[in-house]
Image: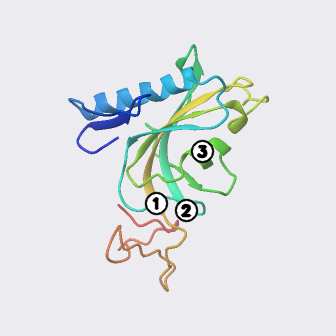
Amino acid sequence: VQPNNYSTFYDDQRQNWSIMFESEKAAVDFSKQVCIAKCNSSPALDSVLCQDLLLGEGQAVEGGDSLEVAYTGWLFQNNGLGQVFDSNVNKDKLLRLKLGSGKVIKGWEEGMLGMKKGGRRFLIIPPAWAYGAQGMAGRVPPDSTLVFEVEVRRVKLAKECSGSDGLSVSSRDSPAPSPVPSSDGFSSD
């Protein structure tokens, strides 16, 4: 995925290709289909498949960083997107998580590494990296492969230093601490 609705890829002969799409939506939809095709053509999905949809900007996130994300989760059914089993996209609250804390499924911990603020990524997660043989009562059947579209809305790097008032001061988001102290340490957008 490249800026200005371009996607670049190489084929099985290692030939590079670039495609310019008419819109961001067309580029994003194409990227999702490429990821689904990768999943369907792999004999056994034994790790998380990641496909960037939008790159975002700033520093790449790593273990220990705190994120606020918007997401939608689908069951992977009949070789494609099945029913939505969870989403916070049209809700007021973003999901807060700290990468590496073990509070979300292993596929998220792995699949979100390297994302940047404003970035969107498509993840296809095998059962062993999701809810496994037990599933999630009433929502995710046992041994389900899951698909997520995640968007990083806010980032607080673990390496950021805290000011004397406990607010994080991030040089890339704002030159000064937020005028409105927020209890969670995120600077206001």
Cα–Cα gap, marks 2 and 3: 13 Å
Disc 1 to disc 2: CB gap under 8 Å: yes
Residue denoted by label 2: 65
Q: Residue at x 78, y 28 (%)?
A: 133
Secondary structure of the residue carrying numbered label 2: loop
Instruction: Give the class, few, some or many, for how many residues have Cα within 10 Å of label 2's Cα (few <14, many ≥20).
Output: some
Residue denoted by label 1: 155
Location of residue 154 in the rendering, given as x and y in whole percent from the top left corner: 44, 57
Upstream in sequence: badge 2 or badge 3? 2
- Tell me the kind of residue under disc 1: Val
In the image, residue 130 sits, relative to residue 172, either above or below, namely above
Location of residue 97 in the rendering, given as x and y in whole percent from the top left corner: 58, 54
- Which residue is farthest bottom? 164
- Which residue is farthest left? 22
In the image, residue 102 sits, relative to residue 30, either above or below, namely below
For the N terminus, give its image quadrant.
top left
Residue denoted by label 3: 108
- Tell me the kind of residue under disc 3: Trp
